Amino acid sequence: MNSDLLSRFHGVIPAGGVGTRLWPLSRASAPKFLHDLTGSGSTLIRATYDRLVPLAGERIMVVTGWAHRGAVVAQLPELRDSDIVLEPAPRDSAAAIGLAAAILYRRDPNIIMGSFAADQVIEPVEVFQAALCEAIHTAATGKIVIIGIHPTHPSTGFGYIHTGQPLDVANAPSARGVEQFVEKPDEETARQYLASGGFLWNAGMFVAPVSLMLHHLEANQPELHAGLMKIADAWNSDERKSVLQEVWPSLPKIAIDYAVAEPAAAVGDVAVIPGMFSWDDVGDFAAIGRLNKASAEDGIINLGDKEVRVYADSATGVVYSDRPRVIALVGIDDVVVVDTADALLVTTKQHAQKVKQTVEALKADGAHEVL
């Protein structure tokens, strides 16, 4: 890759979202990106950071909540203080990614940013990095570039990208135009998308010149753009905290897809690079079961405290405990047991998606101390 072009690239890691389907392992105070959920020995945010280092070097920014600063710094000790952007409260992805773009734009309007969520599992890393190189070259031609994921099944949980014609971009042979973004479909529609071969999952991976991101944000969300630029203008001054506290709570809450990507695609400013790597957003405990390799002896994935002893008689599944104890499972297939000091979850992989409903019920009951 052209060294001048690579020097313009900055990685951005939005580290937000509680991951309610992974409760009570993932909480507001310790969201899923702070955990090792794959058995690799690396937390999700650490792995995300490490994937970007070969292309971005130290030019990596993390956007996270005030409450997570200490944990993020502990896991990413090389992260510079100037590259930690702290949100007073969640305002959705357009505010988080838009603020990063605004701060970077004030540093250098020629920066190309790449935004990659902190809680995704990607492999092989080298294949991801090759796609990212193509995305950077394509973004340099004046495009907002999405790295799309080849669907492995007719998922109704993801938005889809309808790919267009190939683009003639040097060093980016797989770059294509984008016909449109499609909302989460029903299962029959998703099957049609897979059969056609012209659709990719939208995993929220954006690479774009910061100037172009902000241009479309201003055109489509002028109030949000104005607020973010006001914060960015005060970022390196003594007024940062006061301006942030004044402006942030009033910013519109909207996803970056709706605020920037979809309207930009409508005017031909979006391209896509198909990602030929495996990808998982670790959305529930069934995903943890897919991503971890259970031992051949007992079929149990044992996460958490290393002193936990699991006795499994004809049982399979995922077990987590945050303290030493004995857990015995007898004759239960695909069980999920999550044992913490103040909450116990017992379910099955088949019902893993329903954990979110339990969290919503707890929230409605005012049980915020366990959320």
Image (cartoon, grey):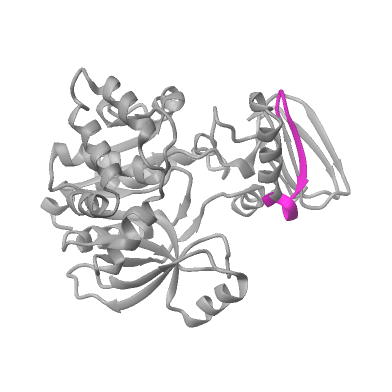
For the record, the magenta segment spans 340-353
Taking depth in this image into account, of 127 and 243 the one nearest to the observer is 243
53 in magenta: no
Q: List x then y, in percent, for residue 102.
A: 22, 40
Q: Residue at x 52, y 76 (%)?
A: 194
Residue 153 placement: quadrant:
bottom right
**From the viewer's perspective, is residue 248 above or below residue 273?**
above
Quadrant of the rendered image containing residue 268:
bottom left
Q: Residue at left 45%, top 27%?
A: 68
Rendered position, 261 above or below 179: above
Residue 127 at x, y = what percent? 37, 60
Q: Nearer the viewer, residue 210 or 244?
A: 244
Image quarter (top left, top right, bottom left or bottom right) of the N terminus = bottom left
Residue drawn at point x = 28 percent, y = 43 percent? 223
Tell me the quarter of the picture where residue 125 sits.
bottom left
Quarter of the image with the C terminus is top right
Residue at the far bottom in the pictured view: 196
Residue 276 in picture, x, y percent from top left: 41, 66
Report the side of 199 relative to 261 (left or right): right
Q: Who is closer to the viewer here, 10 or 158?
A: 158
Q: Is residue 46 left or right of residue 227?
A: right
119 lies left or right of 355: left
Location of residue 346 in the rendering, given as x and y in whole percent from the top left corner: 78, 40
Depicted 84 relative to depicted 159: above or below = above
Number of marks in picture: 0
**Most extreme residue toward the top, as rendered?**
238
